[in-house]
Image (cartoon, grey):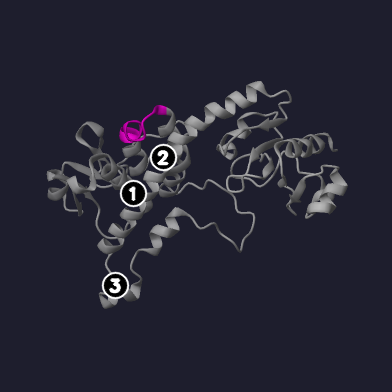
Amino acid sequence: MMKVVTHSGDFHADEVLAVATLSLFYGRENLLIIRSRDPEVIAAADSAVDVGYVYDPARLRFDHHQEGGAGTHENGIPYSSFGLVWKEYGERLSGSVEAARVIEEKVAYPIDAADNAIEVFTQVRSDAFPYLFHNMVSALRPTWKESFEGIRTFDQGFFEALSIAEHILRREITIAAHLQEGLSHISAAYETSPDRRILLIDGDYPVDSVAHKYPEVLFVVKPDKQNTDIWKVRTVRENLHSFMNRKDLPAAWAGKTYDALREITGVTDAVYCHTKRFIATARSKEGALELAHIATEHP
């Protein structure tokens, strides 16, 4: 058994995901996970995560609490234990440099930033805070009352969080791998498009993640992933984390369906336009393309 030590007591998103990474790489059945701050226990472990004040990947030591920290990502965000472990194992676990990089940017950046008290976004509303991975981890800690009554422990919450983190990380690895495959289809569609303001793809490829890399694209035309007789026109957002579109669908289309939308657009098989003007549908690829061309030329 490989002995992995992380700190006891309260637990956080960074060491939960760091241990989850080791668990996926080596197999949970091959790990003895110990929660302790005892220097002798830490020294005797095969790996120490988020504890021990040492960063030395050759010795499988992944802490960042020592004076001077343990370095930073390329964008300057200091590493936490998750980022350090992912730096060591990410490429081998996810199968490619590209997939490992996707997970570093998507998961490690915000986890590491939060653990180092760095804010990465500005709230638009003061009465609605995003529910983050950190909140899910916090929800599994014992409350003061549970601790007082002895009905829930930090160790119990940690291992519940670890199981969830393993599942999420496994899914993110799959998503990142499939993203790389989908990129090739999207790139080919872009290169062959007669009008690069409109990206026509023949499958449910991950356009939300990559369309912003093509600055000319305003709309994506694609088949619906559930209804085979429906084609969609999707707007392209300014970035993956924004609801601002490069170009909205025409205001006159908002909320219109069937005959009303067909009368306004002249597209005989038009079906629907969302009230927020980010999606419209038709019953054929040709109809969806026609909607996209009209929207592109609309002022």
Secondary structure under the numbered disc 1 in the rendered image: helix
Q: Position of residue 156 (x, y in %)?
A: 27, 63
Secondary structure under the numbered disc 3 in the rendered image: helix
Q: Amino acid at mark 1?
A: Glu
What segment is highlighted magenta in the picture?
Answer: 87-97
Which class describes the residues within 10 Å of circle 1: few (<14), some (14-19), or many (20+)?
many
Q: Quadrant of the C terminus?
A: top right
**Residue 95 part of the magenta segment:** yes
Judged left or right of residue 242, residue 258 is right
Which class describes the residues within 10 Å of circle 3: few (<14), some (14-19), or many (20+)?
few
Residue occupying the point 48% across, 30% down: 181
Please tell me the numbered disc located at residue 174: 2
> How far, Cα to Cα, is label 1 from label 3?
26 Å
Name the residue beneath numbered marker 3. 147
Which class describes the residues within 10 Å of circle 2: few (<14), some (14-19), or many (20+)?
some
Please tell me the numbered disc located at residue 139: none
> How far, Cα to Cα, is label 3 from label 2?
37 Å
Q: Amino acid at mark 2?
A: Thr
Q: Is residue 96 above or below residue 267?
A: above
Judged left or right of residue 1, residue 21 is right
Secondary structure under the numbered disc 2 in the rendered image: helix
Q: Nearer the viewer, residue 250 or 256?
A: 256
> How far, Cα to Cα, is label 2 from label 1?
12 Å
Judged left or right of residue 247, residue 108 is left
What is the magenta segment's predominant secondary structure? helix
